[in-house]
Image (tube, rainbow, N blue to C red):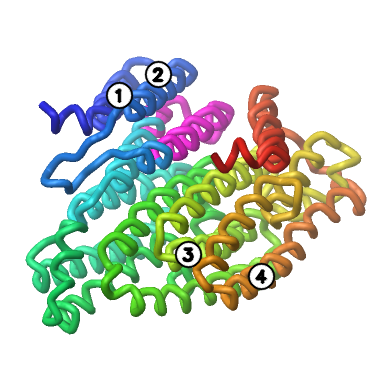
Amino acid sequence: MTMFKVIAPELFLIACSISIFLSALFIKNRRTFSILAILGLLIAGVWKYSLHGAIFNLSFSVDSFDILGSWIIILIAVYVILISIDDIAIPNTSYGEFLTLILTSVVGMLFMIGSRDLIILYLGLETLSLSLYILCSFYRKDKLSSEAGLKYYLMGTVATAILLYGIALIYGATGTTNFYDITKSLSSTKVLTDPMFIAGVVAVIVTFSFKSSVIPFHAWTPDTYQGAPTPITAFLATAPKTALLLAFGRFFIGSLIPIWIEPKTVLIVLSIFTMVGGNLLALSQKNVKRMLAFSSVSHVGYMLLGIIVGTQEGLSAILTYLIAYAIMNLGAFGVVFMLKNGDDMSTYNGLAKRYPYLAGIMMIFMFSLAGIPPTVGFIAKFQLFLAAVNAGLTSLVIIAVLMTITSAFYYLRIVMNMYMKEPDAETEVISSDFTKGLVLSLSILVIVLGTLPSIFIH
């Protein structure tokens, strides 16, 4: 009974997704389904909030850290569902399937965050990945969308196969896949020097790097972000990264502490490549969704600092950053979604003259992504960099600060286009007032959390 109690929110969401999928065969009202899906997500979140405990021999557990991470993912899903109501490119006949896939992906992410075992982590990741493969190609008549889904699927299956192979190697070396038991087994010098164990850890790092868009495993990211439906791109850029960084961060910090110096060195190199490469590649982009794709790559590089710190303070800094990151990116992609041809850089030319409120909102999100005060992006970066400095990673923080300054060039380029160029005659807002209100609320949140950081941090 205790087992079902701990995973009750996940089971409830599975039941909701099945119910919506079956009901969609007979009912085509997308607003009704959206309300049901959102209610299901919020009920699961409240249910999760009341739970603490562990099952499967400590292979899956729920604590305060998991609950906060779960709520970030749930609220991201709620936002994406709300803006998708306006997405006419998703036909009513397919909307039930769309919501089913969103809920299924959330289930996978909740299992990932609560996992304390590599097998459960793998199952959660596969559940998430299968849903995302389909969601990325949901615009069936759009060539770019189909291409995005295919590329993500082909490269994603290779990554998950590598993870499964890595898990097998770790099990062969330690006799377990449980995080806590792996830590105990590392007290043996034989395991520490076992090539099988080392290869297994490398495989896990490679999979994490691919799924999180860490350079040089990021090749799928710009094409997938550009081709996927914009609401899905917003979801893909935020929710999975939250689950990946928290789940794999727990594995790296929780299980590999006895040999932390080796994985730490690898992650430092990956962090530098990702921060530098992501920002430099973003500078030359003419498509806004591709620019935001490389922007998300660079932000993963920053968040790797929290894992490299190797302490609870580092994970807490990541959690703080993820909240800010989600708000900023959901808002920016929301503006892209609201505009006709919103992914074209020229669409933003003179936007302040035609739609001043929208230009102001986009400016707030760009300032926050660049880490300019008084925005939530500045507070998040400050907390993360402070944790890294306290851990003696000053040189890495200097690189991160330099790359943050570099990022201002492509974020502020959009702001300059909006306020200093003549309007594009084809610029048009194509979303409802409800969607405008959602995006506006996120921009207000960016400023409120940036000016009152005590609310945000605590």
Residue 84 drawn above or below residue 125? above
Q: Estimate the spatial distance between the alpha carbons at disc 3 and disc 4, rounded to whole Å.
A: 14 Å
Q: Residue at x 10, y 26 (%)?
A: 1
Q: In the depicted view, which residue is nearer to us: 214 or 305?
A: 305
> Of callouts 3 and 4, which one flags the residue occurring earlier in the amino acid sequence?
3
Residue behind mark 2: 36
Label drawn at residue 16: 1
- Count neighbours of disc 4 (C-alpha within 10 A) and say few if under 14, some if 14 to 19, many if 20 or more: many
Seen in the image, is 109 located left or right of residue 188?
right
> Which amino acid, mark 2?
Leu
Residue 162 drawn above or below residue 134? below
Residues under numbered marks 3 and 4 in contact, where contact means CB atoms less than 8 Å apart: no
Does residue 76 show up magenta in the picture? yes
Q: Estimate the spatial distance between the alpha carbons at disc 1 and disc 4, rounded to whole Å.
A: 43 Å
Residue behind mark 3: 304
Q: Quadrant of residue 226?
A: bottom right
> Which amino acid, mark 3?
Leu
Q: Which residues are magenta?
A: 70-98
Seen in the image, is 106 located left or right of residue 320?
left
